[in-house]
Image (cartoon, rainbow, N blue to C red):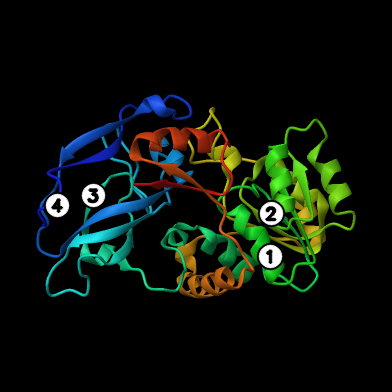
């Protein structure tokens, strides 16, 4: 440990379990002694970490089927982070100053098992881009939906971290028309002007989603990348063409419901329509497709450098604003991914 390393570090902890949706008051920033690394451990200084909606589920405790543990009162939050190595085992590949990714965000310094750190190379032009959840969109569109030239694609939750990349990816893969959904007119305008969406349906506008979809895609949709479920999945089924392929990545309608705890999202769909239209409906998880991450990172880097794709994200300065950033994410106030800079 170098002389410049502080004796303490700060981390965001869950102060109390919320009865409904978590807000800033349910968290606290706590100062703790800086841990001493043991054998096989790497001490890192976090530079950036991702604020992601899955924390809502971990806080709610409904983690059945997930690979991440639930969060209890007093626990430090965690999640994807980009960090600089402070100290590392001398017999390992990492050296002080190296950039790595790991899962112990939400703190200034972290003590990580060496096998829990991934060294960041130069595949991506900006280290922050390693926090992009775009691999989920890419994997769902290439492994499940199989986009064909000229397809009409609908992306629900299009202004979120996954959706803001999904529309761009769909276009690169050959989609002829890309439609998004969002709950904000300002976001809808940005989706069209900045990310190349052809049309956007607006949740909560007073016009039924089914009617808006009929106007945006009069001949129907071929592919759905769904981050929301709920009424938007129902509307998409109504607009599906013969042989449509639906890939479900997220269920924000249930996850962000104050009446639920983040681990369920029931929706009533017309099974008869699934049959007669020959619609495929599949859920995507990265664990089922371990080859996707490497492929995505290589293509993402190429697309970023060529300007074929942009990585939309909102930067939040400082760990003191991290809990509010999570509340604002839940409230739908941000565009793209939400990243805290330290």
Of the numbered discs 3 and 2, the one sitting upstream in the chain is 3
Q: Nearer the viewer, mark 3 or mark 4?
A: 4
Label 3 crowd bin: few (<14), some (14–19), many (20+), radius 10 Å: many
Percent from the top left, x then y, of residue 246? 68, 59
Disc 2 secondary structure class: loop
What residue is disc 1 on? 170
Q: Nearer the viewer, mark 4 or mark 1?
A: 4
Q: Is residue 116 visible?
A: yes
Foreground: 306 or 142? 306
Label 4 crowd bin: few (<14), some (14–19), many (20+), radius 10 Å: few
Percent from the top left, x then y, of residue 163? 62, 53
What separation in Å lies between label 3 and label 2 (alpha carbons)?
35 Å
What residue is disc 4 on? 4
Of the numbered discs 3 and 4, the one sitting upstream in the chain is 4
Q: Nearer the viewer, mark 3 or mark 1?
A: 3
Question: Relative to residue 212, is residue 126 drawn left or right?
Answer: left
Q: Nearer the viewer, mark 2 or mark 1?
A: 2
Question: Relative to residue 62, is residue 336 drawn left or right?
Answer: right
Q: Which mark is residue 194?
A: 2
What separation in Å lies between label 4 and label 2 (alpha carbons)?
42 Å
- Residue 76: name its quadrant: top left
Q: Nearer the viewer, mark 4 or mark 2?
A: 4
Of the numbered discs 4 and 1, the one sitting upstream in the chain is 4
Q: What residue do we see at 37% from left, 50% from top?
A: 79
Foreground: 190 or 329? 190
What separation in Å lies between label 3 and label 1 (alpha carbons)?
37 Å
Q: Marks 4 and 3: in contact by CB < 8 Å? A: no
């Amino acid at each position: 440990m170098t002389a410049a390393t502080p004796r303490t570090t700060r981390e965001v902890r869950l102060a109390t379990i919320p009865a409904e949706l978590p807000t800033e008051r349910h968290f606290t920033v706590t100062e703790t002694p800086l841990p001493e690394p043991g054998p096989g451990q790497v001490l890192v200084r976090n530079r950036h970490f991702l604020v992601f909606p899955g924390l809502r589920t971990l806080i709610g405790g409904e983690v059945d089927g997930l690979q991440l543990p639930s969060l209890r009162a007093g626990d430090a939050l965690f999640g994807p982070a980009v960090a600089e190595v402070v100290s590392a085992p001398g017999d390992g590949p990492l050296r002080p100053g190296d950039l790595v990714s790991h899962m112990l965000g939400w703190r200034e310094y972290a003590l990580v098992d060496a096998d829990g750190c991934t060294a960041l190379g130069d595949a991506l032009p900006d280290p922050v881009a390693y926090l992009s959840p775009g691999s989920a969109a890419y994997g769902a569109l290439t492994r499940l939906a199989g986009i064909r030239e000229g397809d009409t694609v609908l992306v629900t939750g299009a202004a979120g971290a996954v959706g803001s990349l999904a529309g761009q990816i769909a276009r690169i893969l050959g989609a002829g028309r890309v439609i998004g959904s969002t709950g904000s007119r300002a976001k809808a305008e940005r989706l069209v002007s900045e990310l190349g969406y052809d049309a956007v349906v607006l949740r909560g506008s007073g016009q039924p989603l089914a009617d808006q979809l009929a106007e945006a895609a009069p001949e129907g949709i071929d592919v759905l990348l769904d981050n929301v479920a709920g009424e938007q999945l129902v509307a998409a089924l109504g607009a599906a063409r013969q042989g449509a392929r639906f890939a479900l990545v997220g269920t924000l309608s249930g996850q962000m419901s104050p009446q639920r705890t983040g681990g369920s999202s029931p929706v009533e769909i017309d099974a008869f329509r699934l049959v007669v239209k020959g619609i495929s409906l599949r859920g995507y998880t990265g664990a089922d497709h371990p080859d996707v991450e490497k492929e995505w990172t290589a293509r993402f880097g190429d697309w970023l450098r060529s300007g074929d794709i942009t990585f939309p994200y909102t930067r939040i300065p400082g760990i003191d604003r991290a809990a509010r950033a999570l509340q604002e994410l839940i409230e739908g106030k941000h565009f793209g991914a939400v990243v805290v800079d330290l």
